[in-house]
Image (cartoon, grey):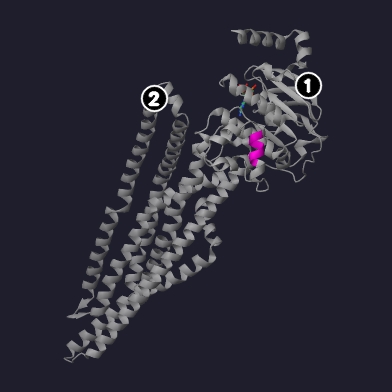
């Protein structure tokens, strides 16, 4: 009910379309209900004249027929106009909900995405809102509203014509209410499960597409196909159960009731036939049969629409669940960055409260210095960078940039001064230029070309027919990983951040690319405080400071030479790498 009310509240965001649509629907329903009245009048007058042996004026029939046509045209036109208005409004409302969901997603903390597959989140933003448009807003306005108006209007007309028949038919309403209630009880869990399966299918498909090469290399096609088919079978089982349920509640029974009511009406009319005189006129009998039969069509439509509304409620619940997530709280205080001095002051952090992955991290970086972060996999290097970006905040201690605790500063302002080049840089669909400028329109074409040239991407530019306007398809699949890195370096150079994080590429690049990238790294590092997550120790020999992390703790700290002299773990790692490089 809460979800239903909340979905309804969105109607208020389009008052003009819905208001006008409702008004026209009332006119359409009113005229549709009124039109049989003209038939009643004709039948009554004609039958009276025949009984009295009188003739019927042709003009009268033409006049009544013209009036009937006028009413029918008004009904059709207003019905069509309201349909269009409701359709416009429904599309606009679902766009609004989709925008809201997307905006909310952007405000959520990074931790929200840790345990949720991307496919599931995108299913909520794209698919569930589409279900809302089609199954709720479109149906609600164009079917529920119009048919409800018809039911109410016909009841009013029946009461006016024959209060006895009107009251007798009211008995049906609680029956239908209980019927609907039973249906909702049975359909709610089924529809909820259906949306979950669709969402699982979405995320599984996304995962298979993203990992298509790995799937093929490891011959996982059969396993993946089996997993997909199992989920797809679960979807089919769910739909079959749903069809059975809809079948029971939507069709056979209601048609049976319609016929039963018709039978009761004829029985009742029979009781009104006394002394050779019928208690109702021919026209009244015509209109009673007409209304009762017309009453069931909208009632049946309302019953039939329940399954789709139910599915919409399941989708609505999932979208609202996302909209209700707590957005990341933030302050308005901006970080004022002057030099790029950084202090980690006894920082402790864990993704889960009592499981720290960084313990008492304490170090200082002077402006313009380069810090190398080394350590085995899982030692906490990326987590340390995550804190610097304020993707997470530490549980203990604080991080200071130019003397300001970043936890007290606005996240956007903290990130605005930082640049990052990841091992596997992320390129967006667009052009080379849009990937360098990242929509910053103040960066000119010349600056983009200059940045690309400085990092050594001139040969890449030369071979692209459209230069910086060459299209980049999803994640830059048509470029080599080295080329993607160069674009990412140029992006950083164009952004001109004070603080730079370089997640050094691992072993999968060749020696030539390595030297190109090393050159690019040296260019972008110039004059910035730089963190390098180093996998090959050769890249950080010149670093001002090297931190060796082990299980979330700083085990060794100092320059390359000092650490070699210390002859600890770093020295051992360095010797091992140097040895393997000789082979
Ligand atoms: N989002 C997360 N949620 C929970 N635990 C995480 C998350 N990210 C990382 N961890 C855990 O935190 C620890 C440190 O991971 P981190 O990624 O910082 O290591 P790393 O040194 O960067 O490793 P690598 O060199 O392999 O990238 C690991 O035990 C890891 O399993």
Q: Is residue 449 magenta?
A: yes
Report the front residue among 510 and 156.
510
Report the front residue among 376 and 56.
376
Q: Is residue 121 left or right of residue 386?
A: left
Q: Which residue is mark 1?
A: 544
Q: Is residue 263 left or right of residue 549?
A: left
Q: Is residue 196 left or right of residue 34?
A: right
Q: Dot 2 surroundings within 10 Å: few (below 14), some, or many (20 or more)?
A: few
* Res 9 quadrant in image: bottom right
Q: Residue at x 38, y 26 (%)?
A: 221
Q: Which residue is mark 2?
A: 223
- Measure the C-alpha gap from mark 1 to mark 2: 49 Å
Secondary structure type for disc 2: helix
Percent of width and height locating residue 276: 17, 80
Q: Nearer the viewer, mark 1 or mark 2?
A: 1
Q: Can residue 279 be seen? A: no
Q: How many marks?
A: 2
Q: Is residue 506 magenta?
A: no
Instruction: Please give the range of residues in magenta.
Output: 448-453
Determine whether the beta carbon of the residue marked 1 sits less than 8 angstroms from the nearest atom of ligand 1. Answer: no
Determine whether the beta carbon of the residue marked 2 sits less than 8 angstroms from the nearest atom of ligand 1. Answer: no
């Amino acid at each position: 009910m809460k979800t239903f009310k909340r979905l309804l509240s969105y109607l208020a965001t389009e008052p003009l379309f819905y208001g006008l649509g409702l008004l026209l629907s009332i006119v359409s329903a009113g005229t549709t209900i009124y039109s049989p009245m003209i038939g009643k009048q004709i039948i009554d007058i004609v039958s009276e004249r025949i009984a009295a042996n009188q003739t019927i004026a042709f003009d009268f029939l033409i006049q009544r027929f013209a009036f009937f046509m006028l009413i029918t045209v008004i009904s059709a036109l207003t019905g069509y106009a309201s349909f269009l208005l409701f359709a416009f409004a429904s599309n606009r409302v679902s766009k609004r909900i989709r925008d809201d969901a997307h905006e909310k997603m952007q405000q959520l903390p990074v931790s929200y995405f840790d345990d949720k597959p991307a496919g599931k989140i995108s299913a909520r933003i794209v698919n569930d809102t589409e279900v809302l448009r089609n199954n709720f807003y479109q149906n609600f306005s164009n079917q529920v509203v119009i048919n409800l108006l018809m039911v109410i209007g016909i009841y009013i007309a029946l009461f006016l014509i024959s209060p006895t028949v009107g009251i007798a038919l009211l008995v049906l309403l609680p029956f239908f209410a209980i019927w609907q209630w039973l249906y909702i009880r049975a359909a709610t869990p089924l529809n909820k499960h259906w949306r979950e399966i669709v969402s699982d299918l979405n995320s599984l498909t996304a995962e298979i597409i993203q990992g298509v090469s790995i799937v093929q290399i490891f011959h996982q096609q059969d396993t993946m196909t089996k997993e997909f088919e199992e989920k797809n079978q679960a979807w089919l089982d769910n739909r079959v159960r749903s069809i059975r349920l809809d079948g029971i509640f939507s069709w056979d029974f209601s048609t049976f009731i319609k016929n039963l009511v018709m039978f009761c009406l004829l029985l009742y009319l029979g009781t009104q036939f006394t002394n050779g005189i019928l208690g109702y006129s021919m026209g009244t009998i015509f209109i009673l049969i007409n209304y009762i039969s017309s009453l069931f069509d909208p009632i049946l439509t309302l019953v039939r629409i329940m399954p789709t509304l139910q599915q919409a409620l399941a989708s609505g619940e999932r979208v609202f669940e996302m909209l209700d997530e707590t957005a990341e709280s933030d302050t308005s205080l901006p970080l004022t960055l002057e030099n790029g001095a950084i202090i980690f002051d006894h920082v402790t952090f864990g993704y889960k409260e009592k499981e720290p992955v960084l313990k008492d991290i304490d170090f200082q970086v002077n402006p313009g210095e380069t810090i190398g972060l080394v350590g085995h996999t899982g030692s906490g290097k990326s987590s340390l960078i995550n804190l610097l970006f304020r993707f997470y905040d530490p549980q203990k201690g604080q991080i200071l940039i130019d003397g300001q605790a970043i936890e007290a500063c606005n996240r956007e302002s903290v990130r605005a001064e930082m640049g990052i080049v990841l091992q596997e840089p992320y390129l967006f669909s667009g052009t080379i230029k849009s990937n360098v400028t990242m929509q910053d329109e103040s960066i000119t074409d010349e600056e983009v070309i200059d940045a690309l040239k400085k990092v050594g991407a001139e040969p890449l530019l030369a071979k692209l027919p459209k230069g910086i306007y060459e299209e980049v398809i999803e994640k830059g699949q048509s470029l080599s990983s080295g080329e993607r890195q160069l674009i990412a370096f140029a992006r950083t150079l164009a952004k001109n951040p004070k603080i730079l994080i370089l997640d050094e590429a691992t072993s999968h690049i060749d020696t030539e690319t390595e030297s190109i990238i090393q050159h690019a790294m040296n260019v972008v590092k110039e004059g910035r405080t730089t963190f390098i997550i180093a996998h090959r120790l050769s890249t950080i020999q010149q670093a001002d400071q090297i931190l060796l992390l082990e299980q979330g703790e700083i085990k060794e700290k100092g320059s390359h030479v000092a650490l070699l002299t210390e002859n600890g773990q770093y020295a051992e790692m360095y010797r091992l790498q140097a040895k393997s490089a000789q082979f």
